Amino acid sequence: MSKDAPYCPVYDSIELLQEKWVLHIVRALLGGPHGFNELSRAVGGANTTTLSQRLEHLERLALVEKTIESTMPPKTRYELTPAGRELQTIIDAIDAWARRHMRRCQEQEARAEAAGQPATPKSGRSAAD
Amino acid sequence: MSKDAPYCPVYDSIELLQEKWVLHIVRALLGGPHGFNELSRAVGGANTTTLSQRLEHLERLALVEKTIESTMPPKTRYELTPAGRELQTIIDAIDAWARRHMRRCQEQEARAEAAGQPATPKSGRSAAD
DNA sequence: TGTAGTGCTTGACTTTCTAGAGCGCTTGGT
DNA sequence: ACCAAGCGCTCTAGAAAGTCAAGCACTACA
């Protein structure tokens, strides 16, 4: 189809970042290392199955490093590698944009739904919690 | 942690940006207005069903504007609103990061897969095409 | 007339994500 | 000693999200 481009790192990194929870995971990890369950809570309740898949993927990409401390309740620790830590710039950009626009966007959305159709009821959490 | 927070624009915008194709759509639209099919091709072959859902959502958030030109083959035009155009900073950050790290990440991934298990065979496209 | 392009919608199917239980292990309370 | 609760996960089954393919109404070009 349109995939003549032999290789586009930007395309691929968008593919990565839009995997569910990936950005949340990175954001949490930028705040320091986390254990597994701890991380699950930090990202807003991701289920463990998905979370371990994502972490495995990020590990394979060498963006996250997993350390098992062999103390007796063997604790796991996930933390960003240098490359992973550089994702900070992306999170910062999202942060800045979000603070400036997100609230207004959601007002617009509420208005649009009220006016038109209830449509895709995908965001049930944001305002409700 | 993030669950108790009554409202977090950053969390919500991450939720938005990780919807499949959203970042691709924004990136394409930053290059100028697009028609529907044209956009579908530009983002790398998104199917029309998902695409119209995403566009509808972005429209409701007032990040994208849809114009129907009432010429005789009535052409549709999707373009970013001012708020949408400010997503440029995010795309730029992704772009910069991708150019610096993505390729190496994928090499790491290939190495990890070769060494360990074939694991989640999710990226069959990037390098293979 | 046939083929291709526009902008979508509908229905069936597949991939992805989720809930919930469970496992082995340790710590803390009674 | 015993039970509840935490850790770090993995498994299974089902719900949700995304995709394919077809089709519609219309124009344009050969």
Image: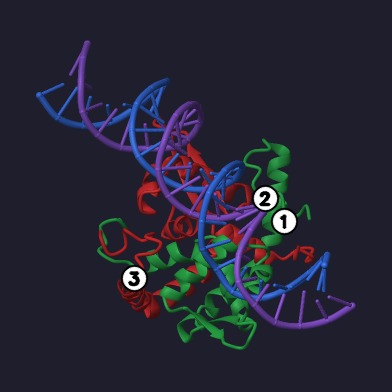
Chain colours: A red, B green, C blue, D purple
Residue under pointer 2: B123
Q: Are marks 1 and 2 in contact (CB under 8 Å)?
A: yes
**Residue for point 64% across, 47% down:** B122
Using the image, tell me which numbered label, if any, was put on residue B126: 1
Do pointers 2 and 3 mark residues of a single chain?
Answer: no
Image mark count: 3
Instruction: List x then y, in percent, for residue B52.
Output: 53, 67
Tell me the residue at 53%/84% (across/down): B67
How far across and how far down the image is residue C28, in percent? 21, 32
Q: Position of residue A59 (x, y in %)?
A: 58, 48
Q: For mark 3, name the chain.
A: A
Q: Chain of mark 2?
A: B
Query: Which of the two residues, B26 or A37, is positioned nearer the viewer here?
Result: B26
Viewport quadrant of the N terminus of chain B: bottom left
* Residue of label 3: A113
The quadrant holding residue B3 is: bottom left
B97 to D6, vertically: above or below: below
Along the line of sight, the residue nearer the viewer: B20 or C8: C8
Distance from the alpha carbon under mark 2 to that under mark 3? 36 Å
Few, some or many residues within 10 Å of mark 1 (<14, 14–19, 20+) = some
Vertical position of residue A47 compared to residue B17: above or below: above
